[in-house]
Image (tube, rainbow, N blue to C red):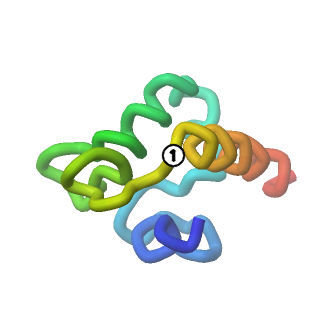
């Protein structure tokens, strides 16, 4: 999650990228889309890949699952 803060902001205000705790993001972004975006990045944006050759060592499947679970907790923190 510390890698996310630079763009998504520690307060989840989304200074460069969408706030991950927003209701809109949480409702529209499916688990598969979130995992794919973290793993592969988003061409043409600041979102880099966190798995594969471009990411160096990258995240494991378990780490991706843990990160997804953490991201899903963010919406409940806004209430």
* Residue at image location 48% in from the left, 34% down from the top: 35
Depth order, front residue of 21/72: 72
Q: Where's residue 12, x and y in %?
A: 60, 66
Quarter of the rendering containing residue 16? bottom left
Element assignment for label 1: loop
Q: Where's residue 13, x and y in %?
A: 55, 67
Asked if 28 appears above or below 67 in the picture, the reply is: above
Q: On the rendered structure, is 64 left or right of 37?
A: right
Count of numbered circles on the image: 1
Q: Where's residue 18, x and y in %?
A: 45, 54
Q: On the rendered structure, is 73 left or right of 25?
A: right
Question: How packed is label 1: few (under 14 Cα within 10 Å), some, or many (20 or more)?
Answer: few
Depth order, front residue of 74/69: 69
Q: On the rendered structure, is 14 left or right of 41?
A: right
Q: On the rendered structure, is 51 left or right of 18?
A: left
Q: Which residue is mark 1?
A: 60
* Residue at image location 44% in from the left, 27% down from the top: 33
Q: Where's residue 49, x and y in %?
A: 30, 50
* Residue at image location 84% in from the left, 47% down from the top: 76
Q: Quadrant of the N terminus?
A: bottom right
Residue extending furthest toward the front: 57
* Residue at image location 43% in from the left, 76% down from the top: 6
């Amino acid at each position: 999650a510390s890698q996310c803060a630079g763009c998504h902001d520690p307060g989840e205000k989304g200074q460069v990228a969408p706030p991950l705790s927003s209701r809109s993001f949480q409702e529209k972004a499916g688990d598969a889309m979130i995992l794919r975006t973290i793993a592969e990045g988003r061409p043409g944006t600041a979102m880099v890949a966190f798995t594969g050759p471009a990411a160096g060592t990258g995240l494991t499947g378990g780490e991706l699952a843990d990160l997804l679970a953490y991201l899903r907790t963010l919406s409940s923190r806004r209430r």
